[in-house]
């Protein structure tokens, strides 16, 4: 995996996706200045990677219309890896122009979902990916962003229902063949369970190679988000997407709201002695920025409500 | 472990503790008839064990004043293992008189918590336990209830803070030595993390023997409840306490409300293909009884809100 930052001191990489996945699924438009304050504060809390937006047409997603500006701003923050979602080649062009360190292009394993969400068949997405790879390779090496092929609806689809593991494995292989640097697995609909996730990770790694499945994007739709994250940790996944306050979901997957909560994920890892580089005290304070900018949004998270166990010290593990 | 019911077809035993742990920590008193309806419906949903009450002085806990009547009623339900909490010898006498299949006596590993919660030092609790064992052994064998020594605050205390693993191990050994049939570990304050829990289970099993640590009682205070349950499953724990709608907590551990939610736990196990014997469709309907009887209580649970993944079929596993 290519990283624009030094990750050698981390056991896992927390990738905050709230400014993208969170904001795209809510009605309110967060002011650009609030987004910047959020990203800055979260980077200062030690979060090493933030997916700051998506290069989708502003007409479709006015909440993310300022993504180019946000990417440029985020690039100015030292030590932060700036990620962006791109739905297609044109989005990738814009992301690269803005200076994203890392771009992800989602492909729905469920083709029906792909057509509804991205308005493209699998073949059409493959073509876009090939063009993005070509574009990236035409750049000087030090300007090439990392490129993740992200398999959404990998554990179940709200339209097609069951998603077969062999389909996920097949598409993972295809994405690597097309030239992605890595693949990621997204539980877009919050359907994954720990046994399924473990099997899936092993099967995909067997196809693409241990280091090329680096990321999981989990939702907490049915409360299993952290149990799934634990399995991913045990299976040596490095990158964990999460959303501050658990905001987010998928507009094309009704009822599937709720990314795993960054604060609870960091608490779990921190308590376990797993190095995230994140200062949980500071992270919890970032909620105030988001709460003030989105007064109508409910912020989730158990740790923020309950506080720490007595005598818990951030960064020192707990009782192990 | 002694069981009054046939558990040979189960991978895990779900023990519903809502009527005890749930009700003891809320203000409203649930009418006896509603409790009976709840217990009956949950038993009919296939929940094999229910902790139906606690034999504490009614003055201290008016919510549980009808425990003897409830135990007698629950005993009439075929196939249900009826458990009760007892704080001391006198409680155990009453539980046995009422006909409980299984009794648990909690001992707080944190001695300060023990004094505040049970008003007893460790030595005093050990004496009670010895007397309870004597009483049980004086009964004809087929009338002896199972007797669990339950270690509360085993993963952290809201008063003492860190609880040392070697203390938990030592007390576990002592409880078995005194004649308990098994010990259980309770995360009374919702402080446990997966690494700590795994280490603790292994250490306690090394002390008391594989089969003698049978039960965990987990809370979801900081959102880690199901991740912890997953670890317990991996470590071959058989009995999982949980509370319908996640009601409950610990009156002496402020902020530590929230047992793990039975519905989400059963969903996780069911999706993983782990046999619980519980029919999740029927279990979800039991919420209506509790909601009607406790209109002011918030019921937790993600699965009840989100519903099943599309094409999920109860009892068939999901995508694995």
Image (spheres, coloured by chain):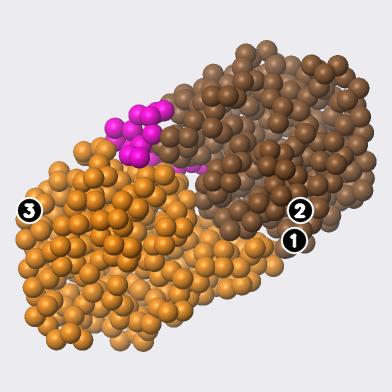
Chain colours: A orange, B brown
Residue B276 visible in the picture: yes
Residue receiving disc 2: B168
Q: Quadrant of the N terminus of chain A?
A: bottom left
**Cα distance, mark 3 to mark 2?**
58 Å
In the picture, measured across the screen, residue B210 lies left or right of residue B137, that is: left
Q: Residues within 10 Å of mark 3 (few under 14, many from 20)?
A: few
Which residue has dot 1 on it? B164
Residue A122 location in percent, x, y?
Answer: 11, 52
Specify the segment rendered in magenta.
B294-320
Determine which of the numbered discs, if any, sits on residue A155 in the image. Answer: none
List x then y, in percent, for residue B280. 45, 28
Say whether marks 2 and 1 touch (CB < 8 Å).
Answer: yes
The local crowd at label 2, few if under 14, some if 14 to 19, many if 20 or more residues have their Cα within 10 Å, is: many
Compared to residue B189, the image places residue B236 above or below, namely above
Q: Tag 1's secondary structure? A: loop
* Residue at x 72% of width, y 39% of height: B212
* Number of other residues with Cα within 10 Å of mark 1, as a class: few under 14, some 14 to 19, many 20 or more: some
Which image quadrant: the C terminus of chain A? bottom right
Taking B251 as reference, is B197 left or right? left
Specify whether residue A177 is painted magenta: no
Mark 3–mark 1 distance (CA, rounded to whole Å): 57 Å
Residue toward you, A87 or B253:
A87
Give the secondary structure at mark 2: helix
C-alpha separation, residue under disc 2 versus residue under disc 1: 7 Å
Could you tell me which chain the residue with mark 1 belongs to? B
Which residue has dot 3 on it? Answer: A123
Across and down, in percent, residue B102 comes to 74, 27
Label 3: element kind? helix
Q: Chain of mark 2?
A: B
């Amino acid at each position: 995996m290519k990283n624009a930052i030094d990750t050698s001191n981390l056991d896992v990489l927390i990738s905050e996706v709230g400014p993208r996945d969170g904001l795209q699924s809510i009605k309110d438009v967060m002011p650009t200045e609030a987004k910047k304050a959020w990203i800055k504060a979260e980077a200062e809390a030690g979060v090493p990677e933030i997916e700051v937006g998506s290069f989708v047409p502003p007409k479709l997603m006015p909440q993310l219309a300022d993504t180019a500006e946000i990417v440029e701003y985020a690039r100015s923050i030292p030590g932060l890896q700036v990620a962006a979602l791109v739905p297609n080649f044109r989005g990738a062009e814009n992301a690269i122009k803005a200076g994203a360190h890392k771009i992800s292009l989602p492909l729905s394993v469920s083709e029906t979902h792909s057509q509804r969400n991205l308005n493209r068949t699998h073949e059409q997405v493959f073509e876009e990916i090939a063009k993005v790879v070509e574009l990236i390779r035409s750049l000087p090496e030090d300007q090439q962003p990392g490129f993740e092929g992200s398999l959404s609806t990998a554990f179940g689809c709200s339209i097609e229902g069951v998603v077969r593991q062999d389909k996920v494995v097949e598409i993972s292989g295809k994405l690597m063949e097309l030239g992605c640097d890595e693949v990621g697995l997204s539980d877009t609909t919050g359907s994954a369970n720990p046994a399924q996730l473990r099997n899936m990770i092993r099967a995909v790694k067997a196809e693409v190679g241990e280091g090329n499945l680096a990321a999981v994007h989990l939702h907490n739709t049915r409360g299993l988000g952290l149990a799934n994250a634990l399995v991913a940790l045990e299976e040596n996944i490095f990158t964990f997407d999460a959303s501050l306050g658990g905001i987010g979901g998928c507009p094309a997957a009704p009822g599937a709201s709720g990314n795993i909560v960054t604060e609870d994920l960091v608490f779990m890892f921190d308590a376990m002695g797993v190095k995230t580089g994140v200062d949980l005290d500071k992270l919890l304070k970032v909620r105030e920025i988001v709460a003030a900018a989105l007064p109508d949004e409910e912020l989730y998270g158990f740790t923020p409500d309950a506080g720490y166990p007595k005598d818990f010290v951030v960064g020192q593990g707990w009782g192990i």
